[in-house]
């Protein structure tokens, strides 16, 4: 049973490492973490034992762990599991920020639990810690046909679309204090 009132203690942004992926739609989770760092005086540094860049941000007076896995998207679960095991965190104390093709680029939604919707990063996290974690689904739009999804998410969004994605990320980051405190 998931305790919906437990505060979030770890925020993870999914993406792919490296300059080739930096501006692709699939890195919306990384963009979310970057916004958290900027808004809440955070910082991250590489920590090999956690397979990523990890650090802290001050949100509503609480020190919240933040993580950008440096594994590729499809292997994100290893990084999330390593942090959860080290800090003894339950899945419902974790918030995963990720791109979502089922939402428009102007939309970001929080939710607890649910399926992976074909997202391979989420699928890998399910295999490592289960599915009862919080998510912020960052809309990046849909290419129109399922056969185009991989190329679509691994490419850069046009500037207008990118701006809409960034606005939705900013709004979601502004909502973080209520999510972190469970209110």
Image (cartoon, rainbow, N blue to C red):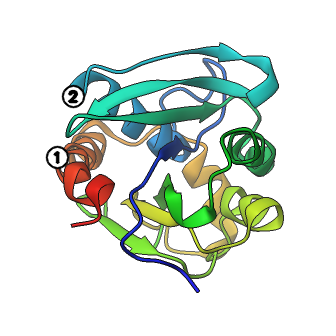
**Left or right: where 143 falls relative to 61:** right
Q: Quadrant of residue 40?
A: top left
Give residue 107's position: percent from left, percent from top: 26, 63
Are there few (<14), some (14-19), or many (20+) residues within 10 Å of tag 2?
Answer: some
Marks 1/2 in contact by CB < 8 Å: the verdict is: yes
Please tell me which residue lies in front, 158 or 31.
31
Residue 101 horizontal side relative to residue 159, left or right: right
Q: Give how far across and how far down residue 73 sits, in percent.
A: 71, 45
Looking at the image, how many numbered discs can be counted on the residues?
2
Above or below, 110 against 54 in this view is below
Q: Nearer the viewer, residue 94 or 21?
A: 94
Q: Is residue 93 above or below residue 72?
A: below
Foreground residue among 80 and 106: 80
- Disc 2 is placed on an element classified as helix
Q: Where residue 124 sits: x, y (%)?
A: 78, 59
| In the rendered image, the vertical position of residue 138 relative to residue 3, given as above or below | above
Judge left or right: residue 2 versus residue 120.
Answer: left
Residues at marks 1 and 2, CA–CA distance in whole angstroms = 8 Å
Q: Residue at x 69, y 39 (%)?
A: 83
Q: Which residue is mark 2?
A: 39
Query: Which residue is depicted at the point 29% across and 64% down?
Result: 182
At x 26% / y 41%, what residue is drawn? 166
Question: Mark 1 = which residue?
Answer: 174
- Please indicate, yes or no, whether residue 103 appears anywhere in the rendered image: no
Left or right: where does residue 121 sit relative to residue 167?
right
């Amino acid at each position: 049973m998931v305790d919906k009132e437990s505060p979030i203690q770890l925020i993870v942004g999914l993406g792919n490492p490296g300059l080739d992926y930096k501006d692709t739609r699939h890195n919306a989770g990384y963009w979310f973490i970057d916004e958290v760092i900027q808004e809440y005086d955070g910082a991250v540094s590489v920590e090999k034992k956690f397979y990523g860049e990890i650090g802290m941000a001050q949100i509503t007076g609480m020190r919240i762990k933040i993580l950008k896995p440096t594994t590729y998207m499809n292997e994100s679960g290893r990084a999330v599991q390593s942090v959860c095991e080290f800090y003894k965190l339950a899945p419902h104390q974790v918030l995963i920020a990720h791109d979502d093709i089922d939402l428009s680029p102007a939309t970001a939604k929080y939710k607890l639990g649910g399926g992976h919707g074909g997202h391979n990063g989420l699928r890998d996290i399910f295999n490592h810690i289960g599915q009862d974690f919080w998510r912020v689904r960052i809309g990046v739009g849909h290419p129109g046909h399922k056969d185009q999804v991989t190329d679509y998410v691994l490419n850069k969004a046009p500037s207008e679309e990118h701006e809409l994605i960034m606005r939705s990320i900013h709004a979601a980051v502004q909502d973080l204090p209520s999510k972190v405190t469970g209110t």
